[in-house]
Amino acid sequence: MTREGLRLILLVFGAFFLIFLILEIVVRAGGETDADGQFSYLGFELPPYALPLNRIRLQIEAYLNNPSQAAYIPDPETGWLPRPDAILEDGILKVNGASIRSHREYNLQPDDDTLRIALFGDSFAASNEVTDEEAWGYNLEKLLNEAGVNAEVLNFGTGGYGMGQAFLRWQKQGKDYSPDIVIFVFQPENLDRNVNIFRLLNVYSGVVYSKPRFILEGGSLALINSPAMPPEEIMDALESFDSHPLAAYEAYYRGRGVSYPLANISKLAGLVHVTLANLYSNSSSAEMYGPDSERGRLGRAIVHAFATDVADGGASFVVMHLPRFDHFRQFHDGKKLPWRFLLEHFEDAYHFINAEDFLSAKYRDDSYYQPNWHYGPEINLRIAEAVTADLLACIEDGTCISSRLQGISVSQQQH
């Protein structure tokens, strides 16, 4: 190599190093480090990662200092329940003594001539952000009775629940109420909640508790963190989470033990790493939610176990898909979301009601949604109308009547 060639190479390397150094200084100067030692730049958290212990500690201490004010109470079997006999959501959501969304109490056994329907799922089943009289479950009961079916609808929907928690609440409480029809609401975000244990690692506010989590062992469901770790013990666990046995099962944990050698030293390299990771994540959603992913396999297994348990009790099982606003818009924009295989499976395997089939494209307009993106009153009523029509048809042909009410038709229930 000639002297001129070597000089050119050194100049190029020098220029790259100078640019790198300038950009490194820009990132370091423009970023900030929080109380837990987590460095962020333009909203991106860069490695090495630190658990947000100070934020979590403040939220848990706020609960522990005044637990009687919490909207949800810790529950060892499901993670949490709505506070019994409470009025939530700024006074619009009434919960009875059994933590069911209702103004009245229910006997465990329904009357002989009453069709009892039970709803399970998250806040989309509970109909958060609308009044009790606007909720789709309330209107489902009203419309069925107006059609001549002596029906009652018990709403076990609970804000923040994953699919596993809905199933666990059925096992803990729902089956004791002997419903004839069980409607499980599938909201695809719950695939993420299924792989989360500590709520505050996934969502920065709200419920401060941990929850049981299903895992797959040899193709079968198994429970971990059951009973759920009480809130008094969560901080001790998180402060040494790198070595905690639950860390391997918490999808929203990024420990300092994760090795990104250059990214841990250089903030610029860390920014490049996070940017590329986000691009990869956006382009590999099938790996995260597809049929071979943990989320996909776990979601399918939970619904199968739920359906089997309901059928063993003599009731009919219905799966209903209620999409989030952004998922609904993507559907009407022609995008095939990676969990579509689950919807196709539900349609093949169960009695399936898909809101995409009856909510028209006009509901892509955000004016039909509440501030936190739950359905507004009009969509709730539309859901109630569609489910009423579906259930009336299957009641008439006997395909969704429990063994308890076998042979009772709509006309026979008129009163």
Image (cartoon, rainbow, N blue to C red):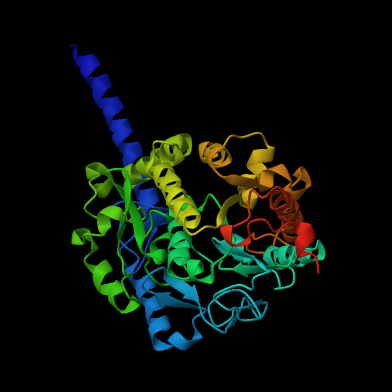
In which quarter of the view is residue 145 placed? bottom right
**Is residue 48 in view from this perspective?**
no
Quadrant for the C terminus in the image: bottom right
Instruction: Give the x, y percent position of residue 404.
Output: 59, 62
Picture residue at 25% right of the left edge, 44% below the top: 260
Picture residue at 35% right of the left edge, 51% below the top: 46
Picture residue at 48% right of the left edge, 61% below the top: 166
- Residue 151, compared with residue 330, is above or below; it is below
- Residue 259, compared with residue 211, is above or below; it is above
Q: Nearer the viewer, residue 314 or 134?
A: 314
Quadrant for the N terminus in the image: top left
**Is residue 262 in view from this perspective?**
yes
Q: Nearer the viewer, residue 173 or 298?
A: 173
Picture residue at 24% right of the left edge, 25% below the top: 10
Q: Nearer the viewer, residue 222 or 332?
A: 222
In the visual, does 98 lie left or right of 284? right
In the visual, does 181 lie left or right of 54? right
In the visual, does 314 lie left or right of 415? left
Instruction: Give the x, y percent position of residue 379.
Output: 74, 57
Number of numbered labels in the structure image: 0
Q: Residue furthest top?
A: 1
Instruction: Give the x, y percent position of residue 247.
Output: 26, 57
Instruction: Give the x, y percent position of residue 72.
Output: 49, 76
- Residue 61, compared with residue 395, is above or below; it is below
